[in-house]
Image (spheres, rainbow, N blue to C red):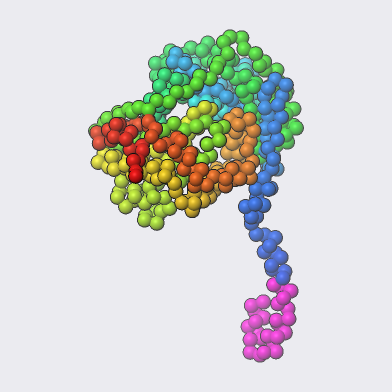
Amino acid sequence: MASSLLKVNGGVSGLVKLSQKVPCAVALNNRRWRSAKALTYEQAVLNIPETKVTTLNNGIRVATENTGIITSTVGLWIDAGSRYENARNNGVAHFAEHLLYKGTKKRSQTDLELEIENLGAHLSSYTTREQTAFYAKCFQKDLPKALEILADITQNSRFAEEDVEKERGVILRELQEAETNLQEVVFDHLHAIAYQGTPLGQTTFGPSENIKSLQRNDLIEYVGNNFKPPRIVIAAAGGVNHDELVRLAEQHFGRIGAGYEGEVPILQQARFTGSELRVRDDFMPLAHVAVAVEGCGWQDPDSLALLLASTLVGSWDRSHGGGANLSNQLAQHTVKLNLAHSYQSFNTSYTDTGLWGVYFVTDRLHIDDFIYNVQHEWMRLCGGVKESEVERARNQLITSLLQHLEGTTPVCDDIGRQILNYGRRIPLDELELRLNAINSTTLRDVCMKYIYDKCPAVVGVGPVEGLTDYNRLRAGMYWLRT
């Protein structure tokens, strides 16, 4: 069309002739544009496949989301972790996770690794305080084989004595590496003092003394007592046929008994304790500090409001731009007064409790000033914030949740965890409706309930001589105003 315009640009009659053809061309281009443009948010949410759930006769739940793509992620999410351990065997869940990949009764470790590599699949796992997961990412056509391998390693692992001794050294080295990650160190200390005397205060790695003393029978006993059908969810996402997966699950997992031969492991109730721990090391360049109050469990109606409050406090580090134009006030003060190298608000939920607070890294001379600003922001939440701030935090939270669900593995992990935590998977449109129901008044009431005049748990590692005295920090958890 551009070349035609150049040719007729010298005369009006030429332009008139050309203009007679324009409406058809424009209409055609508009139709093409409308057909190629991205879906709206509402359309995208409506097009998300449903999560289908079926319960086998022995209690195992099978949950899938079929997006029709050529890759899949399938795995087992088990309601078992370090919270089901005691002081003597703390670390056995993580130890067992390592040993499950060291060979089964029909596959050696080499055979297992070669079989996974030949499929082009990826096998992974993790252990937390309340959950253990084993999952595989593979092509859709290889999903039956991947599930059979997962069934083999979780039911028929050998736990050979030589493998136990070899893996003992690996875990001890892993424990040493974890001690260099100061954020993990701080959060382990935070759980230890916040939940003193309860299994939730234990680490997933366990103390080195336990790693050195755990024996083969301890691992077998833990797996036998905890990998039980009512506590297992088989989840899959991507290219997966639900009915076919149910059939395969019944074939490979249907014979697992739900009964217990010995004592039934019971989840011990958590008990939060306001307290502090200072690990002073003046040779470290920066102080790493966490301050937290007790939050709520997954199924508590206040959980979303606390998550929204945490989003409103936000996070920041020196790689972020924005300066004085940052949206949240704590970040603005941090930049303006050079209070910290980084900070992040967190909301960690468990079955019956949670930790809500802030973790930050700063210079030794700025610890007290930053804590003052943190508590000022917390009291502002308790006094009430603007509706515009709540709306912005809500949009940020929804965006973050959607970005997290990109790919079959994050979706599969989300399905497994939600089925364990809630007994179902919460649809995104329901989640959005529940978030939209939280206004500034609701947020203020929830923050008053969990933050205002509460005893916090405080951990400082590094040059923490300037860490605020606990009594003064406790006094900063309320405002006296007339």
Q: Compared to 394, does 9 lie above or below? A: below
Q: What percent of the width, then of the height, locates residue 368?
A: 28, 40
Q: What residue lies at 45% left-to-right and 20% top-to-bottom?
A: 198
* Front residue (pair 111, 166): 166
- The boundaries of the magenta stretch are 1-26
Residue drawn at point x = 67 percent, y = 45 percent: 48
Quarter occupied by the C terminus = top left
Residue at (73%, 36%) from the top-left corner? 241
Whether residue 104 can be seen here = no
Residue 317 located within the stretch drawn in magenta: no
Relative side of 160 to 468, left or right: right
Front-lying residue, 387 or 435:
387
- The quadrant holding residue 431 is top right
Looking at this rendering, what residue extends furthest in the top direction? 262
- Please say whether residue 20 is one of the residues in the magenta stretch: yes
Q: What main secondary structure does the magenta stretch of the protein show?
A: helix
| On-image quarter of the N terminus | bottom right
Q: Position of residue 115 (x, y in %)?
A: 62, 28
